[in-house]
């Protein structure tokens, strides 16, 4: 088996990890939104149009994480490796793991936000503008960890890793993917929680929108700190080992 | 390919650094998110206590953050010291 065959094996294994793991979180999150939207519609059939609109917009945003995974999987399968080396085999599998694990948390978190927003819209369909704005701001911030995972995946896929570092560099590249991938789960899940609660509260008390946006963003900023640490460790492992 | 013991240990430390920071980030992320979510609820119900609620949230999050910082320290130690 020559190097190109080995690289192809790594590319398909990486793609399987990226899309297989990456489908879990967004699917659960979107399903949660769907179930809450059905509940809300059953309670307030009159506001079914507003509930449907909110749920569909929220589901589309939560779906973006699965689309990142799909993108990484397609790149891994179809884009030829420009700088082949034995270390690249590890880098490609690590890239797939990073994106697959990285979309678990944000997918669920963003789905939770739109689930709470749909419930809120069901109770108070008049405040759909403020609620949608709060939901989208919260979801955008909760999506950050998945974007970090996408960046690290791209660095691992397109970076050049000459065969000098041997075992050390291979372990570092695998560690880099696992660090950002696993590190995105918690913050992505956690940031969805304030986004959901803020959307729910703003649908009932739109006059508190400014205060709620501020509290939500401060809370999300602190909750995202650990994913930034994970990104820093990944970059150290890729470039300084 | 012959691998010395020291090189094997260093490789395990580098892989360990990634796993350490990755797993260590899960708990604080979820925990701090719960605190922030409940703070949003509280601020909406009692906007006049917003300052107090935000302060309590930040203290709780800071304590919850500590295990994430332990993971960061251990990961940096494994990269640069081991």
Image: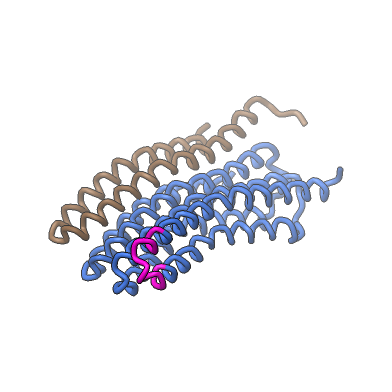
Figure chain in brown: B
Please determine whether, in this image, residue B10 is positioned above or below residue A12.
Answer: above
Residue B24 falls within the magenta-colored stretch: no
Q: Residue at x 58, y 52 (%)?
A: A22
For this orientation, the residue located farthest to the right is A1
Q: Residue at x 39, y 46 (%)?
A: B30
Task: Pick whichever, A154 or A107, lies toward us.
Answer: A107
Image spot of residue A48 (x, y percent): 40, 69
Figure chain in blue: A
**One can see residue A224 in this view:** yes
For the C terminus of chain A, which image quadrant?
top right
Task: Pick whichever, A39 or A105, lies toward us.
Answer: A39
Image spot of residue B56 (x, y percent): 21, 48
Please determine whether, in this image, residue A206 is positioned above or below residue B36.
Answer: below
Residue A40 falls within the magenta-colored stretch: yes
Image spot of residue A163 (x, y percent): 73, 45
For this orientation, the residue located farthest to the left is B48
Please determine whether, in this image, residue A213 is positioned above or below residue B8.
Answer: below
């Amino acid at each position: 088996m020559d190097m190109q065959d080995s690289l192809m094996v790594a590319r398909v294994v990486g793609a399987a990890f990226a899309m297989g793991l990456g489908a879990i979180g967004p699917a659960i999150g979107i399903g949660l939104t769907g179930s809450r939207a059905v509940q809300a519609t059953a309670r307030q059939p009159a506001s079914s149009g507003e509930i449907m609109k909110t749920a569909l917009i929220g589901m589309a945003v939560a779906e973006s994480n699965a689309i990142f995974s799909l993108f990484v999987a397609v790149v891994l399968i179809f884009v030829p490796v420009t700088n082949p080396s034995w270390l690249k085999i590890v880098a490609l599998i690590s890239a797939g793991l990073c994106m697959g694990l990285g979309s678990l948390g944000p997918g669920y978190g963003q789905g939770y936000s739109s689930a709470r927003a749909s419930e809120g819209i069901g109770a108070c369909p008049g405040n759909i503008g403020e609620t949608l704005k709060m939901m989208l701001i919260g979801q955008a911030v909760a999506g950050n960890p998945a974007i970090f995972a996408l960046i690290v995946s791209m660095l691992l896929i397109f970076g050049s890793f000459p065969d000098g570092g041997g075992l050390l560099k291979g372990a570092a590249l695998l560690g880099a993917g696992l660090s950002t991938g696993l590190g995105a789960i918690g913050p992505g899940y956690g940031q969805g929680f304030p986004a959901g609660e803020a959307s729910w509260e703003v649908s009932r008390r739109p006059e508190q929108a400014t205060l709620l946006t501020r509290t939500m963003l401060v809370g999300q900023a602190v909750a995202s700190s650990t994913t930034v640490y994970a990104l820093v460790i990944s970059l150290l492992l890729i470039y300084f080992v | 390919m012959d691998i010395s013991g020291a090189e094997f240990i260093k490789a395990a430390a580098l892989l360990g650094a990634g796993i350490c920071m990755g797993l260590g980030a899960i708990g604080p992320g979820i925990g701090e998110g719960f605190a922030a979510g409940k703070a949003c609820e509280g601020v909406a119900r009692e906007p006049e206590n917003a300052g107090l609620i935000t302060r309590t949230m930040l203290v709780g999050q800071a304590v919850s953050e500590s295990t994430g910082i332990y993971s960061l320290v251990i990961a940096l130690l494994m990269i640069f010291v081991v």
